[in-house]
Amino acid sequence: ALLWTRGLALSAEEATALALGRPANAADLLEAAAAATPAWAAAAPLTPREMEIAALVAEGRSNKAIAGELVISPATVARHVANIMAKLGFRSRAQIAAWAAGRKVAVTAAPAGRGLPPR
């Protein structure tokens, strides 16, 4: 997501030159793009609930399974997943899983009274 954001900061001419491997100053172009990267892209401003859901997605759980564990509706889970994708610039659950795994995001223990008892 970070490289994608950096690429968006390039002009069409700069992006074309970089893609073709012909820029005289490729390092300068990437450095300029990095400087233009918004803070949110580096910080990943997910809410605690979104972090929890990202960790469960990384475990390979479906929306229905996540909803059952967190005692929320599958539609709410789907909305959280969509919000995570939008915030991080992702297009798939696999990208969320890779991102969460790379940051060692883990599901925290649910406070008393939350979640379903084990079966």
Image (tube, helix red, strand yellow):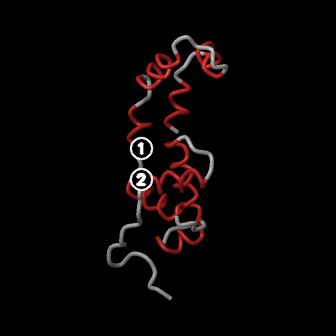
Residue shown at 51%/13% (left/top)? 25
Question: Where residue 50 sits: x, y (%)?
Answer: 45, 55
The mark total stands at 2
Residue shown at 38%/33% (left/top)? 39
Question: Where residue 58 sits: x, y (%)?
Answer: 52, 61
Choose between 22 and 80: the one closer to the eye: 22
Residue shown at 42%/53% (left/top)? 103
Crowdedness near tag 2: few (<14), some (14–19) or many (≥20) residues, C-alpha within 10 Å: few
Secondary element at image label 1: loop
Q: Is residue 21 left or right of residue 105?
A: right
Question: Where residue 33 sits: x, y (%)?
Answer: 48, 22
Q: Is residue 60 left or right of residue 48?
A: right
Crowdedness near tag 1: few (<14), some (14–19) or many (≥20) residues, C-alpha within 10 Å: some
Nearer the observer, disc 2 or disc 1?
Answer: 2
C-beta proximity under 8 Å, tags 2 and 1? yes
User: Between marks 2 and 1, how big is the CA–CA gap?
Assistant: 11 Å
Which residue carries the number 1 mark?
44
Q: Of the numbered discs in the image, which one, if any, rests on residue 13?
A: none
Question: Where residue 3 sits: x, y (%)?
Answer: 52, 33
Which residue carries the number 2 mark?
103
Tell me the amino acid under the disc marked 1: Ala
Indicate whether 91 appears above or below 10.
Answer: below
Residue shown at 38%/56% (left/top)? 48
Furthest residue toward left: 112
Secondary element at image label 2: loop
Choose between 81 and 19: the one closer to the eye: 19
Furthest residue toward bottom: 119
Tell me the amino acid under the disc marked 2: Arg
Q: What is the quadrant of residue 16 in the picture?
A: top right
Indicate whether 31 appears above or below 74.
Answer: above
Q: Earlier in the sequence, mark 2 or mark 1?
A: 1
